Amino acid sequence: MKELITNFVLNTFRKPDFSRLLTIAGDRFNSMYGLMKFKNILSLKFLIVLGFVIAVIPLFLAVMYAAFGMRETSALGRTINSQIFEQTKAVGLVMQKTADIERKARLFILFSDPSLRQPYEQQSYENTRASFKQALGELLKLHVNNKITLLVNEISEKDNLIYQQIIGSVGENNLKLPVDEAFQGLRESTISLSREFERHVDHEFNELRQQSESLEEGLLIKGAVLFVISFIFVAIVLAILSRSMRQLDVSIRRLGSGELEEPIAVSGPSDMRYLGNRLEWLRTHLIELEASKQQFMHNVALEINLPLESIEEGANLLVNESDGEPDSVRQDIARLLCNNIDKLKTVSEELLRYSQINSKQELSQKGTVNMKELLELVAGDFQNRLQEKSISLKKLLRPVEISGIREQLQSVIEQLMSNAVKYSPVGGEIRIILRQSGAQMELEVEDEGPGIETDERAHVFEPFFRGKSAQNDECAEGPGLGLAIVREYVTNHHGRVEIIDSRQDQHGARIRVQIPLSGEA
């Protein structure tokens, strides 16, 4: 057994396998290191430069290809033009020499009588034929096609036949063929040469045009391919950037709406990842601040409740002891203490409520809420308070359903109604409007109270803020957290609440709440 264990250990950790493991580990480390290094290099600046280079390089290649193509076409055109020019000149020379040789031959025949013939006539005819042969040879050197070559050879042979007939008939005063018939075949061959050369020129220029069109088509195809490649690369870069921007946008929106549960992770360039890391730090910092705020509010409420219980017990004892003396000072003090205790309890309850606004339990209770039914329910609960001050309630309610937290939406309506009743004069009127405006719900609550000063509208939703009208109104005493709670609840629903101007024929406070129907921003 000991030997088996020893062999197993040795076979498992023998040197070749251990080296292979080290090699695999090294390869993976290098690949991970390379990936990390690439991610660090992949910054926003790098992507911008890369996108610019990717967009410019295909354009540069297309321009270079077009320049080379134009140069090639231009060179080919110059070559063909030069060849055509030389060939045209050679053909023209052949036509001219043909006419010269016919004229010299006719003069030679005309002076066929030995008594009339001059010694230089034959020599002139010979020189003209030599010049004619040279013109034909120059034409053949210009790389003409086979048909032109055959026609040149045919002309040369006909010239030889005419020459042999003319030289052979010297002194006999007759030719085997008439002069016109002899030179008619030579002229026809020359005309055929001219026509064939015209077709040759047309063929050459057609080939040049086809090559130019082929080059143009190739340029368009390659340019389109380069454009598609550039577009793909640019689209990839934009997709990477847009994904990072969307992640940043979603993260910022979540932070703005107070959704701090989900961690923030931004992928993409290093600059975007850095911003994502800073947003994640901000998220954790906000969580800590929210937790500390809730803890502070909770502790303050507890610290208020503990002495309040003792004070309340003492105040109740004073009231009980003063039952026999209804007009005593002690009874008045006891009642004043009880009223102040009730106010402090209200403050404590509001503090606890404000500290639990963004609790996870409440935020997870979203559902479909019928706002018209909810308003009718809340309005029914306020009937007694409305009758105490003889306040009439005017409602203009449209059926509206939104996605939200029913308890928070009910609290918003209750707080707005409570403020309207609190600040309305006896016999006043409260107007409530509920409607759908596009993709939003609009709720307006308007009273006939003293209203809110313009310079105070930006502060009435701050915690513990009390305006001038609230400070001068004894019945409006309170902790100053009602509208702050309304703003927090509306913000939880991605909405907004604001103070707007009252109607032209009315006065008082007019508050508008706007919340998206879907509950999302």
Image (spheres, rainbow, N blue to C red):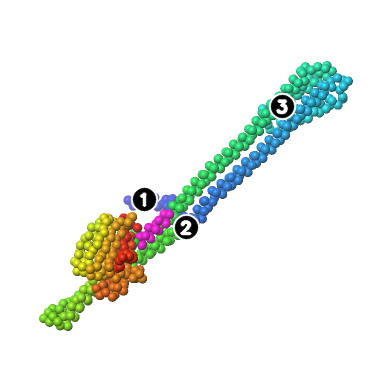
Residue ranking furthest to the left: 324
Q: Which one is closest to the eye, mark 3 or mark 2?
A: 3
Q: Is residue 95 left or right of residue 462?
A: right
Residue 503 image point, x, y percent: 32, 64
Amino acid under disc 3:
Thr
> Which residue matches tag 3?
190
Q: Nearer the viewer, residue 474 or 519?
A: 474
Question: Can see residue 462?
Answer: no
Labels 1, 3: front one: 3
What predominant SS class does the magenta segment belong to? Answer: helix
Binning the other alpha carbons within 10 Å of mark 2 as few (below 14), some (14 to 19) or many (20 upward) gives some
Which residue was labeled with disc 2?
44
Check the image and name the residue furthest to the front. Answer: 505
Of the image marks 1 and 2, the number of the one nearer the N terminus:
1
Report which residue position mark 1 lands on.
8
Q: Residue at x 84, y 22 (%)?
A: 111
Residue 77 rendering spot, x and y as whole percentages: 65, 39
Residue depicted at 24% across the width and 73% down the height? 475
Please tell me whether mark 1 or mark 2 is closer to you in this view: 2
Badge 3 crowding class, 10 Å Cα cut-off, few under 14, some 14 to 19, many 20 or more, is many
Residue 248 belongs to the span the image colors magenta: yes
Badge 1 element: helix
Q: Which residues are magenta?
A: 242-256
Asked if labels 3 and 1 touch by Cβ distance under 8 angstroms, the answer is: no
Gap in Å between the C-alphas at discs 1 and 3? 103 Å
- Nearest to N terminus: mark 1 or mark 3: 1
SS at badge 3: helix
The amino acid pointed to by label 1 is Phe
